[in-house]
Image (spheres, rainbow, N blue to C red):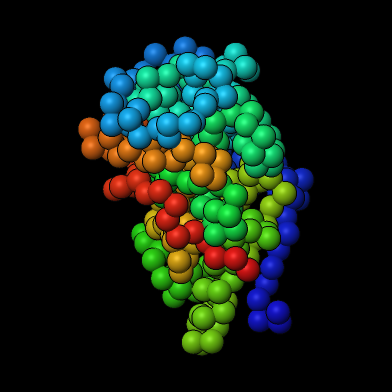
């Protein structure tokens, strides 16, 4: 578009000057830093007793992939949802902790199976595991083959450096004229392009979009002041804010904006496990352990008030 400047930047292009500026900005940030345990032992992991109501809700004919185990596929792509511990073998993170709580509720041993995220549909359909707990969003197309139990809000977040004068982003006019980082070809880019279109139609300044080839380059640009705000999936940004104090959140949007799309456990369609998982999750919500577990990883903002079975998801396109 002629009225919008777009930049595609690389780590090399930013160079040493930006790195120096970024490190100085991080050191100047006043927010407290928080340590997160990435050890394989996870001594702070929360545990719960059996939930008889959840166990009773398991379908009469359901057979677990491995007797006595709740076998869960998980993609250890990045913290805080799932990553490898310091031993480079054990999967830790908020999704791993949640899987443990569900296994406890069902009176089963947790069997985590690390996978590449793209492989989960085939593995679940073939019965290699009982469930997928790996940041899977509910969509109407996926519901044709799988059942879902929601356990976290699907959020995208607006984050700025700690010393930024920007206090809140809640509507399209709040991003007018900003230098904004997002990921190309993603749902979050689609949302911001629509906001920008509305602003331009209203006579407001266009967004200056910035795209990067890696997260490190993106963060350097934000901390050095070469960009004003980043808008991407909330969980990794919230984790960064909680553990480094260099950035802070100024707004969130549901990933399905203007509709709603939450993150859910995926199970086989009609397999007989979904209702038990929903009962178990609502039990965790009711006694408060669910929210404490998310808070441990800096993503309490993504907590749900109630888990649902097969809610409306993103529509087909």
The relative height of residue 209 versus residue 99 in the rendered view (above or below) is below
Q: Residue at x 47, y 12 (%)?
A: 41
The relative height of residue 208 versus residue 219 in the rendered view (above or below) is below
Q: Residue at x 29, y 26 (%)?
A: 51
From the top left corner, tell me how far across and down residue 38 is, in percent.
50, 21
From the top left corner, tell me how far across and down residue 44 is, in percent.
36, 18
Residue 245 appears anywhere in the view: no
Residue 304 appears anywhere in the view: yes
The relative height of residue 313 versus residue 288 in the rendered view (above or below) is below
Which quadrant holds the N terminus?
bottom right
Outermost residue on the right side: it is 12
Outermost residue on the left side: it is 287
Q: Residue at x 45, y 66 (%)?
A: 259
Q: Is residue 55 left or right of residue 187?
A: left
- Number of callouts: 0
Outermost residue on the front side: it is 61
The answer to which image quadrant residue 284 occupies is: top left
Q: In front: 33, or 302? A: 302
Q: In front: 214, or 273? A: 273
Q: Residue at x 72, y 55 (%)?
A: 9
Q: In front: 57, or 194? A: 57
């Amino acid at each position: 578009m002629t009225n919008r400047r777009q930049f595609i930047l690389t780590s090399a292009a930013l160079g040493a000057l930006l790195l120096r500026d970024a490190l100085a900005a991080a050191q100047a940030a006043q927010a407290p830093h928080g340590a997160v345990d990435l050890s394989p032992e996870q001594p702070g992991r929360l545990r719960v007793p059996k939930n008889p109501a959840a166990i009773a809700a398991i379908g009469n004919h359901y057979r677990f992939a491995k007797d006595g185990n709740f076998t869960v596929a998980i993609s250890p792509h990045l913290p805080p949802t799932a990553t490898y511990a310091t031993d480079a073998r054990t999967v830790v993170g908020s999704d791993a902790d949640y899987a443990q709580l569900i296994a406890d509720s069902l009176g089963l041993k947790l069997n985590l199976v690390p996978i590449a995220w793209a492989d989960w549909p085939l593995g679940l359909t073939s019965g290699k595991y009982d469930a997928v707990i790996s940041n899977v969003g509910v969509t109407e197309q996926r519901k044709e083959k799988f059942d879902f139990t929601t356990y976290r809000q699907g959020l995208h977040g607006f984050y700025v450096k700690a010393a930024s004068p920007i206090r809140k982003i809640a509507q399209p006019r709040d991003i007018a004229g900003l230098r904004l980082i997002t990921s190309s070809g993603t749902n979050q880019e689609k949302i911001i392009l629509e906001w920008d279109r509305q602003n331009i139609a209203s006579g407001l300044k266009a967004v200056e979009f910035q795209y990067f080839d890696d997260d490190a380059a993106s963060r350097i640009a934000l901390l050095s002041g070469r960009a004003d705000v980043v808008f991407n999936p909330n969980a990794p940004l919230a984790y960064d804010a909680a553990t480094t104090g260099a950035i802070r959140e100024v707004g969130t949007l549901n990933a399905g904006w203007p509709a709603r799309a939450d993150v859910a456990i995926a199970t086989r369609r009609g397999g007989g496990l979904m209702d038990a998982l929903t009962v178990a999750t609502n039990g965790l919500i009711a006694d408060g352990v669910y929210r404490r577990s998310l808070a441990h990883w800096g993503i309490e903002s993504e907590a749900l008030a109630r888990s649902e079975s097969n809610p409306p998801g993103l529509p087909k396109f």
